[in-house]
Image (spheres, rainbow, N blue to C red):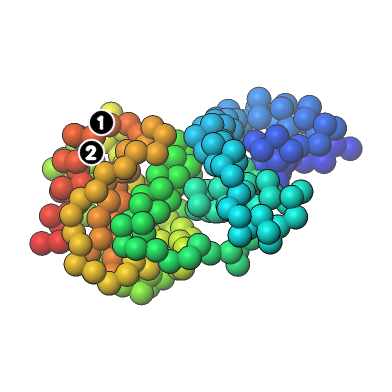
Amino acid sequence: MTEPVDEHDLQAYADGKLPEDRHAAVAAWLAAHPDDAERIDNYRQLAEELRSTYQGVLDEPVPERLRRALHPARARRFALVAMWVAFGAALGGIAGWQLHAGWRPAPGPIADTGAAMARRAAVAHAVYSPEVRYPVEVRADQEAHLVAWLSKRLGAPLRAPKLDAVGYSLMGGRLLPGDNGPVAHFMYQSERGTRITLYVRTEAASNQETAFRYAKEGNVRVFYWMDRKLGYALSSADIGKDDLFKVANAVYQQLNP
């Protein structure tokens, strides 16, 4: 009797690690479940985009102090782990990417902290915005519960900005892992189906820097800023820089009156 297809099989399939004797069963299951087939295909495309974008990291020379500490056979493995920690830790277990939870990058200047936050926000957007069935963990019809839950987990009062005036309605949100604590992730959608996500973290160093900064990771555009102990990053792969700036300004005006 053929074993039923489960999520472990699907993630192994997406990551190219599915045993050969399971391919036929998983392929047949996906053919009968088009929504999940689209989800897994999105994961595979994202994995390929991330590998293409950050492949150069693997070709960078290992610093001398690390070469002395690492056996040559382990140097390439270390570089691979460092790449995913820096750019893909927010993915959790999606598509089989597994990282050592105890490893954390050394703290850096505020500017570097913001840039790292923007990268994580871009990865989170790329992972969750294509989702059809499960784009959010808690939907907008439970907004009060969502905001209260995320505020409690982050240890700071949060708000989900009202963006109807700029064409976007709240879909809901979810909790994500950050460098040193939880992160709130809100998702919005326009009538045309374009999506934006707001990434909010509380582990930022206390500061008064509120200026917008812009970053682009792959095809994801990000406007981000810091405000005291909160950091914000607004991301989208569906709209241009100017349009994203207008939405970011609307978010900023509500969160920083």
Q: Residue reaching furthest left?
A: 257
Tell me which residue sits at (24%, 48%) in the image. Answer: 213
Q: What label does residue 244 carry, if any?
A: 2
Q: Residue reaching furthest right?
A: 1
**In the image, is 167 to the left or to the right of 84?**
left
Q: Give percent across and percent down for residue 68.
A: 68, 59
Q: Amino acid at mark 1?
A: Gly
**In the image, is 167 to the left or to the right of 157?**
left
Q: Give percent across and percent down for residue 228.
A: 23, 69
User: From this viewpoint, is residue 181 visible?
Assistant: yes
Tell me which residue sits at (23%, 38%) in the image. Answer: 244
Observer-nearest residue: 133 or 126?
Answer: 126
- Label 2 residue SS: helix
Task: Write down the residue under mark 1.
Answer: 240
Give the spatial CA distance, label 2 vs label 1. 6 Å
Examine the image and state in which quarter residue 101 appears.
bottom right
Q: What label does residue 139 carry, if any?
A: none
Tell me: residue 153, above or below residue 20: below
Q: Are marks 2 and 1 in contact (CB under 8 Å)?
A: yes
Split into 4 quadrants, where in the image is the N terminus? Answer: top right
Observer-nearest residue: 48 or 44?
Answer: 48
Mark 1 Cα-neighbour bin, 10 Å: few <14, some 14–19, many ≥20: few
Tell me which residue sits at (34%, 38%) in the image. Answer: 216
Q: Give percent across and percent down for residue 29.
A: 70, 31
**In the image, is 175 to the left or to the right of 76?**
left
Mark 2 Cα-neighbour bin, 10 Å: few <14, some 14–19, many ≥20: many
Q: Give percent across and percent down for residue 17.
A: 74, 38
Observer-nearest residue: 69 or 13?
Answer: 69
User: From this viewpoint, is residue 146 visible?
Assistant: no
Split into 4 quadrants, where in the image is the C terminus? Answer: bottom left
- Label 1 residue SS: loop
